[in-house]
Image (tube, grey):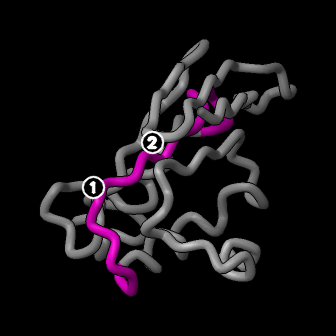
Amino acid sequence: MLRFEQSSAQLEDLEAVVLTYLHIEHSVDLPAFIKAGYFSSRKKSLDIIGPHGNAYFPSMYEFVHILFGKNGAYRYMQDVLTPESDSFTIIPLTVSKSMHKQYKDFSLEMVEVHHGIVPALAVKIVVK
C-alpha cells in the first residue's frame, strides 16, 4: 500500500490485484487497499486473483471471505462482495492449475508453481 501511494498510482486505474501467495507480508495490506476504495471515485469492480488453498492456506475466494464475508474479520465491509457496494465490488478469482485473463490493455497468464507447502502462482503480464 505504501509503495502504491508513493508511485502516485490511482485505484481507479487498476484492472486487477494478483497475490502470488498468501504469506502475511504479501497479503496484509489487502484490507487497507480495499478500504481506500471508499475514499476514491472508483465504481468499476476489481478482480482479486490468487492461488488455490490447501490445509495450511485458504484459497483466494476463502481469504477474501475470511476478511470481508458475513462472518469475516471486517464484516462491516461485506458490501464489497456485492454489486450494491458503497465503493466498488471485489471479485475473488482462485487460480487452480492455470488461468488466462484478458483485460483492455494487457493479459495475465498465471500458473501454479512449487513453493513448499504454500500454494503459489507465477504470473506473466503481456502488454498490448
Pointer 2: what residue? 62
Report the predominant secondary structure element of the magenta stretch. loop
Within-10-Å neighbours for mark 1: few <14, some 14–19, many 20+? some
In front: 120, or 117? 120
What is the C-alpha distance between the residues marked 1 and 2? 12 Å
- The answer to which quarter of the image holds residue 40 is bottom left
Q: Is residue 116 left or right of residue 124?
A: right
Q: Secondary structure at mark 1?
A: helix
**Element type at mark 2:** helix
Q: Is 72 one of the magenta-colored residues?
A: no
Q: Are marks 1 and 2 in contact (CB under 8 Å)?
A: no
Q: Which residues are magenta?
A: 38-57
Measured from the top left, where is residue 6 in percent x and y?
74, 82
Q: Locate residue 44 relative to residue 18 in the image: left or right.
A: left
> What residue do we see at 53% from left, 73% from top?
10
Which numbered disc flags the more N-terminal residue, 1 or 2? 2
Vertical position of residue 10 compared to residue 107: above or below: below
Residue linked to disc 1: 81
Residue 20 position within the rendered picture, expressed as x and y whole percent measured from the top left:
70, 39
